[in-house]
Amino acid sequence: MTEAPTRPTVDVVIPCYNYARFLRACVRSVLDQPGVDVRVLIIDDTSTDETPEVMAELTEDPRVEGRRHEVNQGHIATYNEGLLEWAKADYTVLLSADDLLAPGSLARAAEVFEANPNVGMVYGRVVYYSDHDDLPSVVTPPAGHTVWSGVDWIENRCRTGQNVLSSPEAVVRTSVQQQVGGYRPDLPHAGDLEMWMRIAAVSDIGYVRGKPAAFYRVHQQSMFRTQFSSVFADLEQRRAVFERFFAEHPDLPPRLKHLADRSIAKDALWRAVRAYDRDKLAEIPTEELVAFARAVYAHTEHLPEYRALRRRKALGPKLCSRTQLFVGAHLAKRGRGLVGKQVWKWRGQ
């Protein structure tokens, strides 16, 4: 008698801190995944709401396991506990308790992994939402997938200086995850970008086009909107990510670090440019932004954003904001950004 083929296995780590009201829907989005064998690993980081009771209810399903910390460990330690110590399946997902997997996303990712043994991470499109009961409608691009070499994927991150993942849409080969390690405690905001690049440094990266991979809940209490909402925090964290990554990977082409520095400097200068266009110099420290750009990138004066800032300085913020002389440049940049978002939906970069 021929044995039935084994199905890919996926461990989904769900850290939870006072998100009992979201936990059932989150777990259900995992258990309903077809084509793969899933195990849900809930880690309650000493929640003070009904999380223990909800977790006890959910663990009645043999595919769901749970553990509760006696002392709050914080999100980074909790993530790493699940990813590095607990997960044992073929593939691993880190899913916040207030996010959702999209139907069929794990099977689509597993198909790419199974066909490409050198792929260490597969991700898809994430859909942002605010209400579990009112998920946004989704326009689905044509289905398919792309596989990049790790170096090519890193180069694209350096060209933009930006992350392209929110986290729940990423599925990682567990052996690769445990090879490169987990999240860095000293990079609490942009550490996921640094970890994705570590994965790309040792493996290829896949992207699934078409149907979304996950739903990411946007809320005012998120980390980016609280302690990392200052002008410099995001810039400084991304700079720290690239500095640390390239210090630990000196074998990569030097041009990649140059591209990353240039991208971050351009971003800092553009924020200063927009301060003039909006007459926000009292709120946005433009000189500090310029100094930051210079510290990051030695050729800052050659960037188009630097020349744009000099023109605005010559005219002054009141004239720039009242006459909107440079609104065309802003609209053009915004248009390129919108086009870029549409391209990302199709290509994942």
Image (cartoon, rainbow, N blue to C red):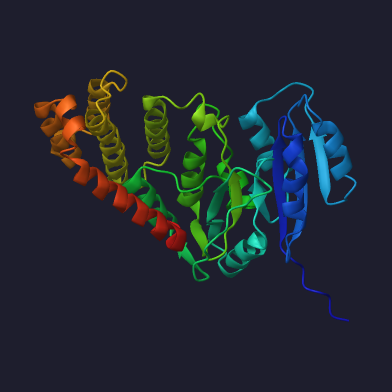
**In front of the other: 42 or 286:** 286
Q: Residue at x 47, y 41 (%)?
A: 193
Q: Does residue 200 appear to the left or right of 28 in the view shown?
A: left
Please state the horizontal and vertical placement of residue 79, each as a whole percent of the image: 65, 36
Which of 136/145 is in front? 136
Front-most of residues 60 and 172 = 60
The quarter of the picture where residue 267 lies is: top left
Q: Is residue 332 above or below residue 188?
A: below
Q: Is residue 345 toward the left or the right of residue 315 in the image? A: right
Residue at the far bottom: name it: 1
Quadrant, the N terminus: bottom right
Residue at 19% across / 31% down in the picture?
A: 322
Does residue 264 lie above or below 47 as drawn?
Answer: below
The residue nearer to you, when weighing 263 against 127, is: 127
Residue 76 placement (x, y as % from top left): 61, 31
Q: Residue at x 73, y 28 (%)?
A: 45
Kindly give the residue lying farthest to the left in the view shown: 314
The percent coordinates of residue 128 (x first, y second) are: 55, 47
Residue 306, percent from left and from top = 17, 35
**Can you see residue 299?**
no
Q: Quadrant of the C terminus?
A: bottom left
In the rendered image, the residue lying farthest to the top is 282
Which residue occupies 54% across, 32% down? Answer: 184
